[in-house]
Amino acid sequence: MAPASKDISAFEIMGDYWTLLIVRELMYGASIWSDFSGVIAIPPSTLSNRLAKLVTAGCVVKSVVPKRAEGAYKLTEAGKGLFPILIVAREWQLKWDLRPGAFVSPWIHECGAPLHCKTACLACHEEIISQDILFNGATQAHGHGGTLNHRTSNKPNADLRTSNAKMAKITVFLGDQKALKVMDALLQGHNRFDDIQKWTGLHPAILSGRLRKLQLLELCVLRLYQELPDRVLYLPSDAGKELIGLITQLMKWDADRNCTSSSKPVVHHKLCGEALKVSLICCACKGRITYENTSVNL
Ligand SMILES: [Zn+2]
Ligand SMILES: [Zn+2]
């Protein structure tokens, strides 16, 4: 097996609409092409391309199946490590997207309870909330122009598990690496247009579009801080602030693998003063949530 590429960050892997859906299906045990194409309206070339990239990222291994040119795919340990990211995203979706019709994975924890989670500090065990996170030295943008960065805007809903035309809000957000990067900037305290632009490295027109998208998703609110000429701050909404759990899980995946293209902000938990290490806790039994100790009832 080829060693995992350390150049591909969790932001790049999860910040792609198709890859997000493919990883979800892999978590359910999907292995061969028809397992994916049965639930995602994905063109074969796109499926092939995204699976190849997951192999390069070290998240998936491919094995040869007799008489099947496309082979079979299985999650590696690094791939299973993406599970908390999906679960935190799912929790956000359950709380903040109240429109009917969006699909939510029916995961069950080993304690028997339907999965509800919170992201907790490993040192003090308190729940992670955005006000308690201190970002220092966050001067460098997350790696961009990465190999998994593809155009994702204006994509029709191709997730056949979703019962109507509404794509889950979290998928619209998470599957767009640029939107993810802008939200990361807002949560790290970059709130003026120029500052966000400098930090993310995005073209101003692209940044404007993503800020608009975040407003439409109700993740970002504007506050006027100067008149004539009008200047605004872009601030995370309450729903946006709760994406901190997702951002910390993305950073954790990179940190666990020493991802080389990821920025390494020094992050502390204000409550206990420790360098931030997070874990995912079951709200019912307070036990840890991992891929291995959960099951899905499809
Ligand atoms: Zn703490
Ligand atoms: Zn539990």
Image: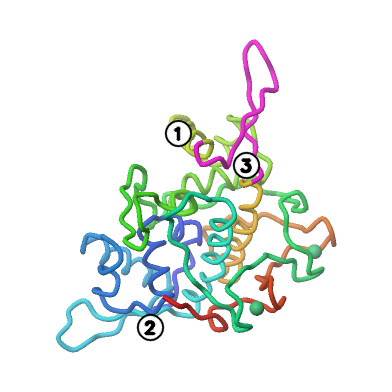
Within 10 Å of the Cα at label 3, are there few (<14), some (14-19), or many (20+) other Cα atoms? Answer: many
Q: Which residue matches tag 2?
A: 1
Amino acid marked by disc 1: Gly
Q: Residue furthest front?
A: 100
Residue ID at (53%, 36%): 215
Examine the rendered structure and indicate whether residue 23 appears above or below residue 31: above
Residue ID at (46%, 59%): 14
Is residue 189 left or right of 263 when viewed as pictured? Answer: right
Within 10 Å of the Cα at label 1, are there few (<14), some (14-19), or many (20+) other Cα atoms? Answer: some
Q: Which residue matches tag 1?
A: 209
Q: Which residue matches tag 3?
A: 186
- Quadrant for the N terminus in the image: bottom left
Report the front residue among 181 and 104.
104
Residue 40: % across, % down: 30, 63
Q: Residue furthest right?
A: 272
Q: Are marks 2 and 3 in contact (CB under 8 Å)?
A: no
Amino acid marked by disc 2: Met
Which of pointers 2 and 1 lies earlier in the amino acid sequence? 2
Within 10 Å of the Cα at label 2, are there few (<14), some (14-19), or many (20+) other Cα atoms? Answer: few
Q: Are marks 2 and 1 in contact (CB under 8 Å)?
A: no
**SS assignment at label 2:** loop
Residue range corresponding to the magenta coloring: 216-238
